[in-house]
Every structure is written in C-alpha cells, then in structure tokens.
Image: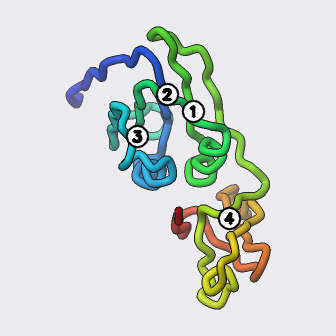
Amino acid sequence: MGKQMNVRAIENGTVIDHIPADCLFKIINILDLEHETHQILFGTNLESKRMGTKAIIKITDRYCADDEINRISIVAPMICVNTIKNFQVVEKRQVEVPTQVEGFVKCGNPRCITNHEKIKTRFLVQRDDVGDLKLRCVYCEKSTSQHEMVIIK
C-alpha cells in the first residue's frame, strides 16, 4: 500500500478532478495557470479507483468560466469541475463536450489556411469508432485526434 497524501481543502475556488494524468499540463496551459496569481495546487499520478491514476487542480478564489470548461472538456471529457464556497461543494459539474471549438487548437495540416493567414481555427468535434474525440477542421477537413492536439493561445 502506497503513502496517502492529505491535501488541504480550499475555502473558495475551483477544484478540477478526474483529470487523466497525461492531460494535466495541457489543462494548465489552456487555463493559462502559469500566469495565475491565485494559489494553485496540482498533483499528478495520484491513485484513483476509477482511473488507475489521475491528476487534480485546486485554484483558490478563482472560478472557471463556461468557455474555459468547454476548452478543457476537449482535452479531458471525463473531468469533474467543483465550485467551492465556504469549504463546501456548491456545484459539481460533469463537463459537456461542445460540438464546435474555435481558436485554441492548431490545425495539424501544414497547408491549412489557418496556419498561413490570420484566421481563427475552427473545428467540429466528433467521436471515432472507439469513442475518442477527434477535431475536424472546417477549412481543410483534416481530423486531429485528442492526443495529437496542439494548444495555441
């Protein structure tokens, strides 16, 4: 049996739980947490009965906007976003994957117009045969898998 790590509860803020361990730093990038001034705690490769291993992010005194949650759902559609007020979970949200995303994922086709002109990327969100997410560029129709996505700002 491994060591158990106790992580202090936050009084107010957001807890993002059930993050696949390999998606943690993509989510940190999407939420621009490297420039965040609020206290942030994150852990990775934590034990999870449901997932084997997982990651978690706790952000004190900050709440995620709907568009931020939509963005992180593309990378990790199984996450749970908890809103904390006075040490209590006041909202527990399973994310919903949007049908379309704009402007934060790079098209993997080097010939795509979005890689050469000042055009915001736009993708339709689809699922492949095994249920994994894929993004299909509306300009060049190239499909990009969840694991191939490159986040842009």
Q: Secondary structure at mark 3?
A: strand
- Between disc 3 and disc 1, whose residue precedes? 3
Label 2 sits on residue: 14
**Residue 112 location, x and y as percent?**
68, 85
Whichever of callouts 2 and 1 sits on the residue coming sooner in the sequence is: 2
For badge 4, the amino acid type reads Lys
In the image, taking residue 70 as reference, residue 49 lies left or right, namely left
Residue found at x 46% / y 18%: 12
Say which amino acid is labelled 1: Cys
Query: Dots 4 and 2: beta carbons under 8 Å?
Result: no
Q: Which disc number belongs to residue 80?
A: 1
SS assignment at label 1? strand
Choose the circle earlier in sequence order: 3 or 4: 3
Residue marked by disc 4: 134
Q: Indicate the position of residue 133 as horizontal and vertical percent values.
A: 67, 59
Towards the viewer: 8 or 77: 8
Q: Nearer the viewer, residue 121 or 23?
A: 121
Counting from the top left corner in percent of width and height, residue 40 is at 35, 34
Question: Alpha-carbon distance for marks 3 and 1?
Answer: 11 Å
- Which of pointers 4 and 2 lies earlier in the amino acid sequence? 2
At label 2, which amino acid type do we have? Answer: Thr
In the picture of the structure, the residue carrying the numbered disc 3 is: 55
Residue at image position (60%, 62%) is 104
Look at label 3 and name its amino acid: Ala
**Could you tell me which residue is drawn at 42 percent across and 31 percent down?**
59
x, y percentage for residue 20?
47, 46
